[in-house]
Image (cartoon, rainbow, N blue to C red):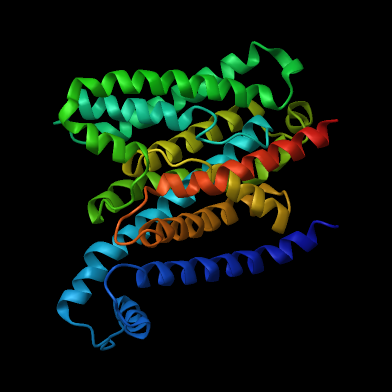
Amino acid sequence: MTQAGPSRARPLWVVCALVVLAVSMIAALLGGAADISPWQVVLQVVDWLPLVHVDSGLAPVEQGLLYELRLPRVLVAAVVGGLLAMAGAGYQGVFRNPLADPYLLGAAAGAGLAATAAIVLLPSVAGSIPVAAFLGAVGGVFLAYTLGNTAGRAGGTATLVLAGVAVTSFLTAIQTFVQQFKVEELQRIYSWILGDVGGGWDQFWLVLPYAAVSAVLLLLHGRMLDVLSVGDEEATSLGVPAARVRLMVLLAASLATAAAVAVSGLIGFVGIVVPHVVRRIAGGSYRIVLPLSLIGGAAFLVLADLVARTVIAPAELPIGVVTMFVGAPFFVAVLRMTRRAST
């Protein structure tokens, strides 16, 4: 296929993904313990649009329920899902490893440990959690990559993942030790570890600046990741500074992971499920994989949160449990395909 074909198809894929995301968000606004007419919810969403006024017929209490509880939850889920999926695609491009993922690579565990330490040791320092989570995410990836390199190339594709699992286990053990210093916060910390996107508008506005910066940086490096996929020497001969590109993408993906972990806790497998589905549907160019992972990850986590809120209603599952139910068998399938391709 020529390059013109994918270029022409790219806007169509993005439009289709945006439609799926919009439908997912409307469905998530409809889901919940309170029984609200779907048509009234749609009218209320239209009424929220700038310069538009529509009478939805909802009572003030129902409008408050949608605006103060469901809408920020849906938006936080969308931002976090998009960040995790995009970070996964970025890590896979940097390491040229289809199994790289924020959760499996140690980034999420590093961010979780650092954020927990900030909660326990610096509870009164404003903005300490996102900064600590970013440093922890970078440190976790660095440890996993360094440990994976000690095995050389003989370990194959699975070496980096095994190193990430080891680093994740080690950092999680340290995190468990640290959180014992604040026993009264254990319930909050455990809920955070299993994933939670119900933090409200404060969490949304907290994550938004970090999300914008990391998403823009990753999107700007899509073409360069395509060039890097052919090898560092070829990329250098084409004028692409391979080392600088890898560093920038690594930092941007770690910032995205840290921002997501800081507001939602540890939510696994989004960064491996969504990019692989995108590649199967739209091809392997990072110029399309990155934006579609951003949109697809948002839709995926919004739907996962909808399932978490409704499957055992009125009780609620942690969203991380839902993504693990989907992601664990998906990861096994990807691992089998990777091993088959390498033989």
Locate residue 85, reporting x and y percent: 53, 47
Residue 170 occupies quadrant:
top left
Q: Quadrant of the C terminus?
A: top right
Residue occupying image coordinates x 52% and y 53%: 297
Residue occupying image coordinates x 69% and y 42%: 333
Classify 124 as above or below 45: above
Residue 120 occupies quadrant:
top left
Most extreme residue toward the top, as rendered? 150
Which one is in front, 263 or 339?
339
Which one is in front, 299 or 188?
188
Locate residue 155, reporting x and y percent: 72, 18
Q: Quadrant of the N terminus?
A: bottom right
Locate residue 131, reporting x and y percent: 32, 31
Residue occupying image coordinates x 73% and y 53%: 283
| Left or right for 6, reference 130 | right
Classify 23 as above or below 172: below
| Left or right for 230, reference 271 | right
Classify 330 as above or below 59: above
Residue occupying image coordinates x 71% and y 27%: 157
Tell me if I can see residue 294 in this picture.
Answer: yes
Locate residue 126, reporting x and y percent: 18, 35
Tell me if I can see residue 241 in this picture.
Answer: no
